[in-house]
Image (cartoon, rainbow, N blue to C red):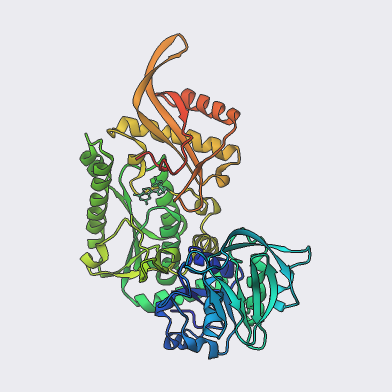
């Protein structure tokens, strides 16, 4: 826990799938908040955290079940405003002397409610400022159990056909409890409820990127002292922003290693190294290990074997260069908040999500390095905002994700230098087309893959026998699921023509219209 200078809000997590969205909504209001699983929240913890308000999240359990999760009783005497959401509402009612009835799922006779519902106003409440101006409000319900008797001191301020206690409050104690999920998209004006809640709790909205930058710099200086830091710079947004921030804090005590495996896009190494070295004055080692990587990949066509070779070599190479940096005691990583949130797993215990494909996994222990992770408290869009603050160019911050194994997983089958050269050219033409048509920011990720097949064509008067390639473009939120991007036929035709005309070695272009699932975004 950090940032004692900010107003802080504590979210006690009961395991809802959408708890992270509560944090998102609050951060959008410039409110600093942290999510902690209910098992870890003792009253000592609360006292140390010193929240100005508390939110109890939803969760999959049933409060009528013996042994189901509870909040520490003491929080109801702690004297700060509390908002309970769904399971959080039921916990409040149960712990404060009301009654919750089990729905069919938990063996009771009550009515479950899943999906859209409409809440009617029933009295005025500062929490509801801006609501009900146009009649009933659409909300998202997702509950098996429901409250059947309010706890003493509570009144009803909104009802829905299946939730007579949809919005409840004890205004004397500043306790609020709603049956629905205001944090999700399907409660269109849910953000207003959070805004009203933090206002009435007295939050100043002091969580800004500028404040974060200053505090993070001070914290890095305190952690690192006069020791040296190394950073594996990939050219991706996270490692770039982490490097820029650490550089601002400790200057030349930071050395970045850019591992060039020869599987990068056209001009990528020059652009990334040039930007950091020449424009931002960072010490960057350009580790050109193309020969090593392509040598070991020679003749390999199995996707997993290719990935394993690249992963192993990456670590070897990084270690080789890091060993040459004198006095390095710290390793910088661009870990983000979604990677470190401890969520309540359905098996009951807290579980931690760990970035599975981290490029330098295992290295810190092996090399005796301590981690510096200055982005641990940020969401992806906050990292981008911080990148802007630090002066990284806008086009760089908005770049599509690029996988660690690079073009190797866009070159199914055996990798050859000739194929990689063709692929780089085709990809450059495709991305140029996307930018020219103003589509780059609408697309989550776009690239060309070169297919391990040659096809017959005719160009001019001659027969050709060249490679086929495929264009991929997807929309997505987090890369876990994805839809193909619906380009116009004109765009597809124009781009295919350009690739065939401008890239020797390609005589056929296809467009991949597979969603994820069942496909993956990359081809391997
Ligand atoms: P898939 O192909 O699994 O990709 O649907 C989902 C997202 O992850 C990226 N990706 C990787 N990123 N190391 C990375 O840093 C990897 O090994 C890796 N494999 C896939 C992929 O580009 C997409 O954005």
Q: Nearer the viewer, residue 497 or 223?
A: 497
Q: Nearer the viewer, residue 349 or 359?
A: 349
Residue 220 position, x and y percent, is 40, 74
Q: Where is the N terminus found, in terms of image quarters?
A: bottom left
Residue drawn at (25%, 39%) of the image: 294
Residue 406 position, x and y percent, is 36, 44
Q: Where is the C terminus found, in terms of image quarters?
A: top left
Residue 205 position, x and y percent, is 62, 75
Residue drawn at (60%, 41%) of the image: 438
Residue 46 position, x and y percent, is 47, 85
Q: Nearer the viewer, residue 436 or 474?
A: 474
Q: Residue furthest right?
A: 134
Side of 256 relative to 365 (left or right): right
| Count of numbered circles in the view | 0
Side of 486 relative to 282 (left or right): right
Q: Is residue 388 above or below residue 506?
A: below
Residue drawn at (46%, 26%) of the image: 509
Residue drawn at (43%, 53%) of the image: 236
**Residue 352 found in image quarter:** bottom left
Q: Residue furthest front?
A: 109
Residue 445 seen in the figure = yes
**Residue 522 found in image quarter:** top left
Residue 6 seen in the figure = no
């Amino acid at each position: 826990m950090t940032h004692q200078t900010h107003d802080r809000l504590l979210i006690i997590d009961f395991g809802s799938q959408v708890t992270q969205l509560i944090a998102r909504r609050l951060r959008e209001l410039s409110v600093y908040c942290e999510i902690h699983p209910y098992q870890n929240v003792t009253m000592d913890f609360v006292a140390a955290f010193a929240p100005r308000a508390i939110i109890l999240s939803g969760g999959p359990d049933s409060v009528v079940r013996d042994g189901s999760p509870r909040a520490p009783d003491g929080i109801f005497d702690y004297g700060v405003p509390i908002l309970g959401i769904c399971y959080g509402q039921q916990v409040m009612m149960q712990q404060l002397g009301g009654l919750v009835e089990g729905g069919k799922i938990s063996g009771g006779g009550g009515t479950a409610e899943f999906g859209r519902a409409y809440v009617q106003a029933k009295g005025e409440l500062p929490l509801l400022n801006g609501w009900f101006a146009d009649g009933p409000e659409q909300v998202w319900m997702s509950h098996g159990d429901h409250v059947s008797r309010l706890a003493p001191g509570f009144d009803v301020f909104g009802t829905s056909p299946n939730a007579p206690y949809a919005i409840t409050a004890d205004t004397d104690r500043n306790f609020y409890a709603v049956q629905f999920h205001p944090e999700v998209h399907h409660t269109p004006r849910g953000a207003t409820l959070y805004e009203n809640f933090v206002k009435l709790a007295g939050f100043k909205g002091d969580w800004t990127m500028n404040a974060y930058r200053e505090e993070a710099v001070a914290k890095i200086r305190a952690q690192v002292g006069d020791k040296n830091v190394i950073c594996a710079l990939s050219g991706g947004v996270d490692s770039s922003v982490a490097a820029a921030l650490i550089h601002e804090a400790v200057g030349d005590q930071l050395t970045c290693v850019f591992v060039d495996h020869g599987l990068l896009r056209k001009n990528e190494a020059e652009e990334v190294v040039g930007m950091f070295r020449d424009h931002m004055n960072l010490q960057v080692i350009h580790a050109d290990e193309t020969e090593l990587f392509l040598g070991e990949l020679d003749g390999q066509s199995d996707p997993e074997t290719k990935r394993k070779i690249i992963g192993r070599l990456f670590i070897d190479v990084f270690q080789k260069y890091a060993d040459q940096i004198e006095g390095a005691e710290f390793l910088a990583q661009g870990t983000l908040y979604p990677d470190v949130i401890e969520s309540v797993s359905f098996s009951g215990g807290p579980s931690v999500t760990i970035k599975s494909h981290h490029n330098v996994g295992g290295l810190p222990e092996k090399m005796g390095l301590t981690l510096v992770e200055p982005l641990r408290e940020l969401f992806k869009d906050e990292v981008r905002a911080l990148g802007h603050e630090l002066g990284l160019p806008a086009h760089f911050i908005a770049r599509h994700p690029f996988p660690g194994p690079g073009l190797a997983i866009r070159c199914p089958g055996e990798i050859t230098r000739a194929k990689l050269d063709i692929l780089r050219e085709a990809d450059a033409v495709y991305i140029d087309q996307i930018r020219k048509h103003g589509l780059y920011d609408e697309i989550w990720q776009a690239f060309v893959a070169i297919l391990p097949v040659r096809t017959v064509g005719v160009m001019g008067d001659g027969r050709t026998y060249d490679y086929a390639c495929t264009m991929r473009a997807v929309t997505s939120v987090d890369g876990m699921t994805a839809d193909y991007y619906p380009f116009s036929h004109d765009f597809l035709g124009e781009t295919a023509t350009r690739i065939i005309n401008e890239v020797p070695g390609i005589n056929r272009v296809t467009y991949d219209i597979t969603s994820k699932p069942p496909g993956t975004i990359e081809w391997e």
